[in-house]
Amino acid sequence: ILYMIEQQARKIVDEYVAKYRPLDLEMRRTWYEYDTTGNKDASNRLAKIELDIRQLNSDPIRFAELKSLYKDKGKVEDVKLRRELEVVFLRHLPNQVSADRLKELTKLERVLQETFNDYRPSVDGKKLTPVEADHILSDSTDNSLLEKVWKAQKMVAPLLEDNFRNLVKLRNNIATDL
């Protein structure tokens, strides 16, 4: 029976990885494009990929099988396979909610990420790129300038606050429902 559990675990992990890996690679490429260019089209593609991954991880049939295997994970002798099973199970667990909630979660996270990435601190009337701000903070010896840049970077917080609170509430509701 132990061999059967390992076979079943290997099968479900391999099937999942075959579906997940292409999405993950595309997400990483798209994330890099968005992060380096700020391109809104890339952000929209990223939101779609993130939702696709959440939907993959919300499959109730796969989750039921994973849950059963996860309960018996101590019987999986292959340590690497046991860890893979655990990771796949934990990727599925928070996604066992309605499609509407998955969409809402993805949308809120995307809005927060865009707001944060698009923010440019303003110092003495000049908007700084993240690279410029980092260079000032790492290289400058002008304490007044350092303080201005540091404080200006923190001004993104009020722009994020409402959506962040909404995201926390949504995640807490999801966790309660699970």
Image (cartoon, rainbow, N blue to C red):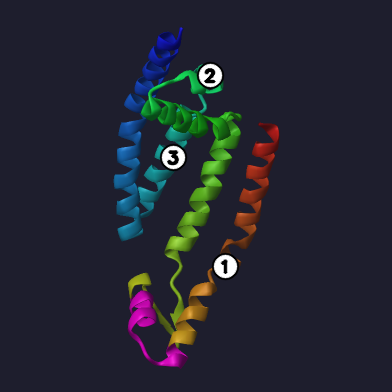
Q: Position of residue 87 (x, y in %)?
A: 45, 33
What is the x, y in percent for residue 55?
48, 29
Badge 1 or badge 2: first in the primary sequence: 2
Helix, strand or loop under label 3? helix
Circle 3 residue: 50
Position of residue 59 in the picture relative to residue 31 (left or right): right
Q: Residue at x 39, y 50 (%)?
A: 43
Q: Residues within 10 Å of mark 2 (few under 14, many from 20)?
A: some
**In terms of image quadrants, where is residue 13?**
top left
Q: Is residue 158 magenta?
A: no
Residue at position x 54%, y 73% in the image: 155
Residue under the image location 35 percent in, 79 percent down: 138
The amino acid sitting under disc 1 is Ala
| Prevalent SS, magenta region | helix
Q: Vertical placement of 156 versus 17: above or below?
A: below
Say what secondary structure mark 2 lies in.
Answer: loop
Q: Nearer the viewer, residue 40 or 22?
A: 22
Callout in the foreground (1, 2): 2
Mark 2, residue position: 72
Which labelled disc corresponds to residue 157? Answer: 1
Reply above or below: 29 against 164.
Answer: above
Indicate which disc, 2 or 3, sits on the residue closer to the N terminus: 3
Q: Say if 54 sits above or below 136 in the image.
A: above
- What residue range appears in magenta? 132-145
Work out how far the residue at label 1 is from the one at label 3, CA to CA, in angstroms: 24 Å
Query: Total marks drawn?
Result: 3
Q: How far from the left and from the top, in percent, is residue 83?
A: 43, 31
* Mark found first going from the N terminus, 1 or 3: 3
Judged from this view, the residue extending furthest toward the top is 1
Query: What amino acid is labelled 3 in the image?
Result: Glu
> Which secondary structure, mark 1?
helix
